[in-house]
Structures are given as structure tokens and as C-alpha cells.
Image (cartoon, rainbow, N blue to C red):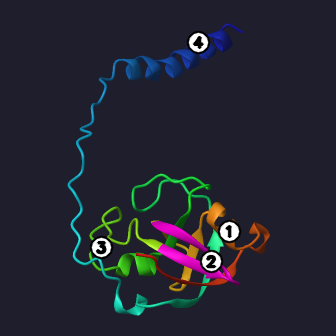
Amino acid sequence: MLLRPLRVVLMLAISITPLRTLASTPTRTFDLAPRAACTTVSPDPPGFLEGEQINWSAGFYEPGLGACGIVNTEDDFIVAMSHIVYDAYPGFTGTNCNPICNRPITVAFQGKSVQVTVTDDCLVCGSNEMQLSPAAFAQLADLSEGLIQVDWSWAD
């Protein structure tokens, strides 16, 4: 009978030891200096994106911190372009360094249109697909539709 309480005490001592070690660990500091500015090669879209883009699939998603380094909400009028388009855009030098970022586009569906800003890439999208914020999608169709066929063009 005396061995059981001793075993419990030893187990407690072992489980508390890491806490003492953790408390004596020095804290780390991080350099939060700003990143170097992005360099852009060309503000023009690639040849395959000139003029109006017809018959793209558009859905909606829950925005957050986008690939352009901008935090968005579902109430912002933004778009996540296909990662294929995002990565192929001239001047792309890294996720947050892409001249496509902050470019406005006009998206049209069944006589309605909405202007949105590119602030993200869509990793699950094919080459002719995009994801709109819920607020932007709702300007074109009811959210219950889920996926619609749209046309779009550069708005600048």
C-alpha cells in the first residue's frame, strides 16, 4: 500500500519538472523591420488576359489575409483570382509582390456587374475560375447559387 502513493508523487514530480524548465527559458525577440519593397516588371496583363474574359466560373469564399498581404472581410468587394493567373502575371516576384494586387476588375453576370479588387489568389481554382467575397457575389446572384458563369474585364 505504501508503494502506490509514492508512485503518484514521482509521477507528479516528473510532470511538474518541464514547467520549471519552461519558466527559466529565455524569451526570444524578433526583428519586425519592414520588408523590402516589391519590384514590378510590367503593369500590363499577360496576352491571354487582354480584353474581356468570357465564361469564367465564380464562387465565393471567406476572405482573410490574402496573398497580396491585405486582410479583407466578407463585406469587402474583393476577388481571389485563379492561382494560375496570379502566378503568371508579369512582374510576379513572390506571393505579396505581384502587380496584379489591387488591380480592379469588373465582373458581370446576367445584366448585373460589380467592381472588385484583386487581393488574393485562389489555390483551388482552375485557370478560368475566381472566388468573390460574399458581398461582391451577392451583388450578382443569391449566395445559394454557389457557382455562376461570369464575364470580366480590367477596370483600370
Q: Position of residue 52 (x, y in %)?
A: 49, 89
Q: Circle 1 is placed at which residue position?
A: 139
Q: Circle 4 is placed at which residue position?
A: 9
Q: Which residues are magenta?
A: 105-118
Question: Which quarter of the rendered picture does the C terminus lie within?
Answer: bottom left
Q: Circle 2 is placed at which residue position?
A: 58
Residue 108: within the magenta?
yes
Q: Is residue 4 left or right of residue 69?
A: right
Disc on the earlier residue, 4 or 2: 4
Callout 3 secondary element: loop
Which amino acid type is shown beneath numbered disc 4? Val
Q: Nearer the viewer, residue 91 or 3?
A: 91
**Going 75% across and 67% down the picture, which residue do you hit?**
143
Callout 1 secondary element: helix
**Going 35% across and 92% down the picture, which residue do you hit?**
47
- Report how far apart the C-alphas of labels 4 and 3 lie in the structure: 60 Å
Disc on the earlier residue, 1 or 2: 2
